[in-house]
Amino acid sequence: MNNNNYKITGRREITDSTFVLEMERNGMTFEPGQHLLLGKAGDIHHREYSIYSGTNDNTLDVLIKEVEDGEVSKTLKHLRPGDAVEVQGPLGFFTIEEEFLKDNSKFLFIASGTGISPFHSMAKSFTGLDYQLLHGIRFGEDAYDRKDYNKHRYVACTSRDESGDFHGRVTDYIRQHDFQKNTHCYLCGNFEMIREVMDLLEKKGIAQDHLHAEVYF
Ligand SMILES: Cc1cc2nc3c(=O)[nH]c(=O)nc-3n(C[C@H](O)[C@H](O)[C@H](O)COP(=O)(O)OP(=O)(O)OC[C@H]3O[C@@H](n4cnc5c(N)ncnc54)[C@H](O)[C@@H]3O)c2cc1C
């Protein structure tokens, strides 16, 4: 595990409140789905951020939403290329088991907001993965980097406008669709969404050992 300062090499605005920070990789190896503990160098406050980039990328990227009155996300928003961040990691077990990758399994990824980050890393790292990604967002503009996904696999579920692929919440989408019972389901984002989706998928016959979750807040 690495534990030191990493230089920021780039920064990309995605929406008014969401941005990607690119850091030097410093040889770090990680599994898609893992996260980092990140804070401004010298700052005592750190938070978890999933790795957004793929395992073959040169930089280590994170996708961050600035939380109103948030301590760390606000600080990170003001950092620029050349500044340093303190990084601990990689951490966590929200990863895809090797045996699932070998047996041509089907995957259902369900994210709310920046909860899409681990799935971005998985889709970039494991080309040929048979997945469908349901992204719960409020407005179509929050479909972060949707061009990076195969357009037949990505479904933007927009709750506040009709510019997505589906108008409604991810829970509405799931209620209206059927899924193969042996699908491996990965859920990431806010606790309320995860609780509701788990309940729905279990009722649709997906076994508990096929349900994996990462709660952000
Ligand atoms: C394993 C893990 C991975 C994570 N990965 C990411 C990631 O890739 N990108 C990312 O942006 N965040 C991610 N988070 C959330 C992140 O760690 C912070 O909680 C978030 O940035 C807020 O930190 P803060 O210091 O700015 O706010 P704080 O001062 O800690 O909290 C302010 C309040 O905002 C709430 N809150 C936290 N996150 C959100 C949110 N997204 N929307 C609305 N309210 C929120 C908190 O519950 C709290 O009540 C992850 C969390 C975990 C546990």
Image (cartoon, grey):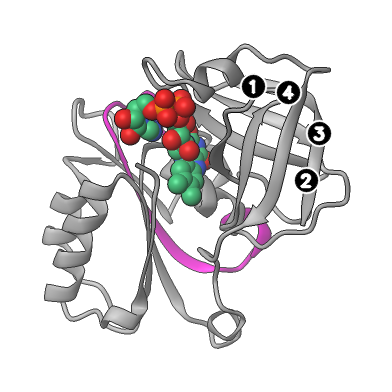
Q: Is residue 25 visible?
A: yes
Q: CA distance from mark 1 to mark 4?
A: 23 Å
Query: In the image, ligand 1 is in what quadrant?
Result: top left
Q: Secondary structure at mark 1?
A: strand
Q: Amino acid under label 4?
A: Gly
Question: Could you tell me how far apart the alpha carbons at marks 1 and 2 are, in whole angstroms?
Answer: 25 Å
Marks 1 & 3, CB-CB < 8 Å contact: no
Mark positioned earlier in the residue sequence (2 or 4)? 2
Q: Which residues are magenta?
A: 123-143
Of label 1 and label 2, which has the lower sequence position? Answer: 2
Which residue corresponds to mark 4?
42
Q: Is residue 150 visible?
A: no
The residue lying at 40 percent from left, 22 percent from top is: 67
Q: Earlier in the sequence, mark 3 or mark 4?
A: 3
Gap in angstroms between the C-alphas marked 2 and 4 = 13 Å
On screen, residue 154 above or below 61: below
Mark 1 touches mark 4? (CB < 8 Å): no
Q: Quadrant of the N terminus?
A: bottom right
Using the image, determine if residue 21 lies above or below residue 215.
above
Tag 1 residue: 12
The residue identified by callout 3 is 6
**In the orientation shown, which residue stands out farthest toward the front?**
44
Q: Which residue is mark 2?
A: 3
Q: Spatial distance from mark 1 to mark 3, Cα to Cα?
A: 17 Å
Query: Residue at coordinates 66% horizontally, 23% vertically from top-left?
Result: 43
The amino acid beneath tag 3 is: Tyr
Q: In the image, is 178 to the left or to the right of 143?
A: left
Left or right: 112 in relation to 85: left
Mark 1 Cα-neighbour bin, 10 Å: few <14, some 14–19, many ≥20: few
| Quadrant containing the C terminus in the rendered view | top left
Confirm or reject: label 3 Cβ below 8 Å from ligand 1: no
